[in-house]
C-alpha cells in the first residue's frame, strides 16, 4: 500500500521531504538544538521499517536489556539504542492506524483491559489540565503514549501466536543473560560486596532495584523455555545454565522486593490453578483499606516514626536485612516519610491530584519531620516508592482506582484464559505473562517502575499477550458453539 502511494505521488513526497529536511536544519541552528537534525533521519527510518515493522519491533525488545542511559550537557537524556528505535516505531504505528483506521474497531481495542488502559490515559489528560506542573505533566503524557503505542498496541499486532511468543522470549533472554554475566563478573572484582552492587549494574541499569526486578521477570520465561526442549538435549541444558546464572544474579542484586516476588511465583501458580484470584484480590484490598484506615485514625501513623539517630544505611547485607525488620533501615523509613507526604497531598486534592510527574516538586511541604532520614534531601529526585500511592497523590483517588481496576481485570482475565486453553503451551504462555506482571506489581508496592525504561515495556507487552490469548480463546469457544 505504501509503495503504491509513493509511486503515485513521488514528486510530492520528494519535495515535501526535502523541504522538511531543510526546515529541520534551519530550526536546529536557530534553536541551537542539534537533536532536531535527527528528525528527518528518524522519519526516513520509520518509512523504511514500515515495510516490515515486526523486525524493528523485535530489534527494539532485544535492545532493552543492554540499553544505556545517556545524559547530554543540555540536560536532555535518552536511552541508547532503544529510544530512537522506539520513536521510529511510534511513527510507524501512527502510519498503520492512518492507513487502516478500521482496525480500531477490532476486538483488541474493544477488550476491557484496553478500554481501562484508554480510560487511564484519558484521566491523565484531565489531571494535566489541573496540574501544578503543566510542563512536567505534558512530558509524562507524551512518554506514556509512546510506551503504550508500541509496547501494548503494537505488541497486540505482533504477538499473536506461539511462534511470535517464542521469538519474543529469545530476543529478551539472550541479551539479558549476557548482561547478567557481565554484571556478575564486574561485581566479582569487588568481592560481591553489597555496597558495590549499584556500581556493578552500570551502564545497563540505573540501580540494583531496577536490575533485580528485570531479571526476576526473566525467571518464568526461562522456566517455560526449558519445557520447549527434550530431557537430556543440549538446549535444555543451556536453559538450565541460563536459569542458574539468573538465580545467582537475583541473589547478588540484594533486592528485597525481587526476592519476595521470586518466592511469590509458586504461590501465584497455586492461586491460578485453584481459581482463587478473586479471593486474593478482595482480601488484599480489604487488608490495605483496614491498614491505612487504622493509620489515619487519631494519627496512629506517628507511632511508626523512626529514630533519626539510629536509622542509617547499612553497607553490610546482614545488617541491612536486620535493620529492615527492626525498623532501622534508612531506605525503608524513607519510604514511610514519602508515603506520609503523599497521603497528605491526596487529602488536599483527592479528586485530580497535583498532576502527573509533580510529586518531586511538591511533596516537601507535606512531609512530617518526625519521619525524616539522612537521605530525605532526595538529591536523586526519586518519587514515592509505591506506584499506587504515587497515582493517588498525582492523579487523585479516581486515577488510582482506575489503574487498580486495570490491574484487577488483567489478573482475573489471565486466570480465566489460563483455564480456557486446551494446549499446554498456550497455558504456559498465559502463565508466563501473568507471572512477569505479578513480579512487576509486587515491586511496585516498594518502587515506581511503570515508567522505567526496561521494566514498563515488559509490563505492557505481557498485558497485550493476555488480551490476545483471551480474544483467541473466545473465538474458539464461539466456533465450538456454532
Image (cartoon, rainbow, N blue to C red):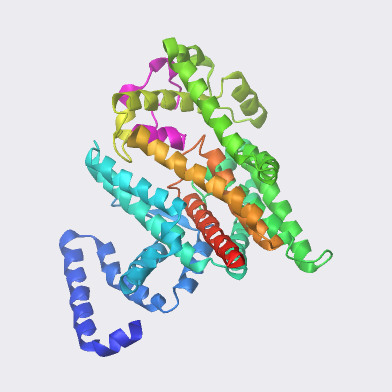
- Residue 434 seen in the current view: no
Front residue of 317 and 255: 255
Q: Residue at x 51, y 42 (%)?
A: 408
Q: In which quarter of the image is residue 148?
A: bottom left
Magenta stretch: give its range.
364-393
In this picture, is 397 found above or below 41?
above
Q: Residue at x 37, y 51 (%)?
A: 118
Residue 300 at x, y percent in the picture: 47, 12
Residue 244 at x, y percent in the picture: 73, 52
Residue 247 at x, y percent in the picture: 70, 48
Q: In which quarter of the image is residue 199?
A: top right
Front residue of 254 and 452: 452
In this picture, is 411 found above or below 83?
above
In this picture, is 130 found above or below 301?
below
User: Residue lying farthest right?
Assistant: 232
Query: Could you tell whether 135 is left or right of 251 in the image?
Result: left
In this picture, is 166 found above or below 466?
below
Q: Quadrant of residue 442?
A: top right
Front residue of 112 and 287: 112
Q: Which residue is drawn at 32% across and 76% down?
A: 44
Amino acid at each position: 500500500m505504501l509503495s503504491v502511494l509513493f509511486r503515485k505521488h513521488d514528486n510530492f513526497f520528494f519535495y515535501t521531504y526535502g523541504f522538511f529536511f531543510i526546515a529541520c536544519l534551519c530550526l536546529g541552528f536557530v534553536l541551537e538544538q542539534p537533536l532536531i537534525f535527527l528528525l528527518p533521519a528518524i522519519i526516513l527510518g520509520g518509512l523504511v521499517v514500515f515495510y516490515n515493522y515486526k523486525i524493528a519491533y523485535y530489534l527494539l525488545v532485544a535492545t532493552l536489556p543492554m540499553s544505556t542511559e545517556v545524559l547530554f550537557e543540555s540536560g536532555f537524556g535518552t536511552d541508547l539504542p532503544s529510544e530512537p528505535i522506539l520513536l521510529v516505531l511510534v511513527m510507524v504505528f501512527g502510519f498503520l492506524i492512518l492507513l487502516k483506521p478500521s482496525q480500531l474497531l477490532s476486538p483488541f481495542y474493544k477488550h476491557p483491559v484496553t478500554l481501562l488502559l484508554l480510560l487511564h490515559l484519558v484521566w491523565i489528560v484531565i489531571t494535566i489540565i489541573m496540574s501544578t506542573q503543566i510542563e512536567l505533566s505534558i512530558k509524562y503524557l507524551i512518554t506514556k503514549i509512546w510506551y503504550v503505542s508500541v509496547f501494548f498496541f503494537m505488541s497486540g499486532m505482533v504477538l499473536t501466536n506461539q511462534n511470535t511468543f517464542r521469538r519474543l522470549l529469545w530476543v529478551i533472554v539472550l541479551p539479558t543473560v549476557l548482561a547478567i554475566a557481565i554484571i556478575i563478573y564486574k561485581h566479582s572484582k569487588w568481592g560481591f560486596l553489597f555496597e558495590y552492587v549499584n556500581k556493578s549494574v552500570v551502564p545497563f541499569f540505573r540501580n540494583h532495584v531496577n536490575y533485580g526486578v528485570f531479571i526476576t521477570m526473566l525467571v518464568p520465561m526461562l522456566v517455560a523455555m526449558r519445557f520447549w526442549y527434550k530431557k537430556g538435549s543440549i538446549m535444555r541444558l543451556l536453559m538450565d545454565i541460563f536459569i542458574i546464572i539468573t538465580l545467582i544474579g537475583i541473589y547478588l542484586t540484594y533486592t528485597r522486593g525481587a526476592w519476595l516476588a521470586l518466592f511469590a511465583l509458586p504461590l501465584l501458580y497455586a492461586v491460578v490453578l485453584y481459581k482463587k484470584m478473586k479471593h486474593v484480590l478482595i482480601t488484599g484490598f480489604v487488608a490495605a483499606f483496614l491498614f491505612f484506615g487504622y493509620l489515619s485514625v487519631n494519627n496512629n501513623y506517628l507511632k511508626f516514626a523512626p529514630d533519626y539517630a539510629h536509622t542509617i544505611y547499612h553497607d553490610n547485607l546482614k545488617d541491612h536485612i536486620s535493620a529492615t525488620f527492626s525498623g532501622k533501615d534508612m531506605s525503608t523509613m524513607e519510604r514511610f516519610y514519602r508515603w506520609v507526604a503523599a497521603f497528605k497531598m491526596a487529602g488536599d486534592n483527592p479528586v485530580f491530584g497535583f498532576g502527573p510527574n509533580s510529586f518531586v516538586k511538591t511533596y516537601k511541604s507535606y512531609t512530617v519531620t518526625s519521619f525524616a532520614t539522612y537521605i530525605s534531601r532526595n538529591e536523586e529526585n526519586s518519587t514515592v516508592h509505591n506506584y499506587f500511592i504515587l497515582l493517588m497523590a498525582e492523579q487523585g483517588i479516581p486515577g488510582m482506582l482506575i489503574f487498580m481496576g486495570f490491574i484487577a481485570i488483567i489478573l482475573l482475565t489471565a486466570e480465566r484464559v489460563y483455564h480456557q486453553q486446551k494446549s499446554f503451551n498456550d497455558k504456559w504462555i498465559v502463565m508466563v505473562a501473568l507471572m512477569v506482571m505479578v513480579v512487576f506489581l509486587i515491586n511496585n508496592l516498594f518502587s515506581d517502575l511503570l515508567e522505567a525504561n526496561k521494566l514498563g515495556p515488559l509490563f505492557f507487552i505481557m498485558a497485550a499477550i493476555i488480551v490476545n490469548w483471551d480474544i483467541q480463546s473466545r473465538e474458539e469457544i464461539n466456533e465450538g458453539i456454532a
